[in-house]
Image (cartoon, grey):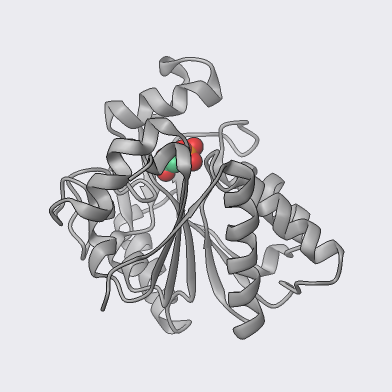
Amino acid sequence: MGGPNLIVVDDHDALSGAGAAFVADVIRERPAASVVVATGRTPMGLYADLAARVRAGRCDPSRITAIQLDEYLGLGPDDRRSLFGWMRRSFLGPLGIEDERVVRLPLDGDLGQACVAFDRELEARGGLDLAILGLGPNGHLGFNEPPSEPSAHTRRVRLSPVTIEANARYWGSVADVPTEAVTLGLGPLLSARTILLVVSGEAKHGIVHRALEGPVGPEVPASFLQDAPDVTVVVDRAAWGDA
Ligand code: PGA
């Protein structure tokens, strides 16, 4: 248990290449891996690079199962803000992953019950093999907003003002960002066999150091990565700094 394995790269392009190589290696070792797929700006280049490897015949993701990380509540099926739509455009489509190989979060009915069933289903599948995650400006993973306990289940959450502000850039204005979501819980995420965290840009400098070097606790949910079994962090120089 030496803590996360840190890879500092020059820039976002290098992050995408290193991240894609890492994911391709995991898929080579575990062709039927259950893979959690984050949306957000940071992993987009990684997914594009991975798709290029697939087209070139250097990676075969046809047997993986893609697991949704988080989703807003209260959107219609065709809403442009849907994170599933973003996952489809950036990952499932380019990698040719069929719908039956995707596990989606519950969004309606008795959500409490449905989230318990969702976590049970993950367990029945043998847990998560790989979680590809970004880092929120407030230290969240998925929508596990601070404070989140490391045992937190998959659940309905209220988004924090920091997250709403950060996501406003995708949807136009703060008023456009839904206020509630469902997130895969920190508990199942931290139990993933392998976790890849990608962090890019100067704005993440403070939070990436708090997450990896600060006290471990619910106020910075990503700090629990310090105690998770197999974590690799690929961070660019803008985020990490010269330290
Ligand atoms: P970003 O999002 O990759 O767009 O910075 C990360 C997150 O909020 O989890």
Figure quadrant of residue 12:
top right
Judge left or right: residue 204 versus residue 64.
Answer: left
Q: Residue furthest right?
A: 56
Where 106 sits versus 28, above or below?
above
Position of residue 196 measured from the top left corner of the image (x, y, whole percent)? 46, 62
Placement of the C terminus among the 4 image quadrants: top left
Q: Residue at x 85, y 62 (%)?
A: 55
Where 11 sits versus 233, above or below?
above
Where 77 sits versus 117, above or below?
above
Q: Residue at x 62, y 75 (%)?
A: 25
Q: Residue at x 26, y 79 (%)?
A: 1
Tally of numbered tags? 0
Position of residue 74 measured from the top left corner of the image (x, y, whole percent)? 45, 34
Can residue 128 be seen here?
A: yes
Can residue 73 be seen here?
A: no
Position of residue 112 measured from the top left corner of the image (x, y, whole percent)? 29, 57
Relative depth, front residue between 79 and 8: 8
**Ligand 1 quadrant in view:** top left
Judge left or right: residue 70 versus residue 15.
Answer: left
Judge left or right: residue 160 versus residue 70.
Answer: left
Position of residue 226 measured from the top left corner of the image (x, y, whole percent)? 25, 64
Q: Residue at x 64, y 66 (%)?
A: 21
Relative depth, front residue between 235 and 193: 235
Where 37 sits versus 157, above or below?
below
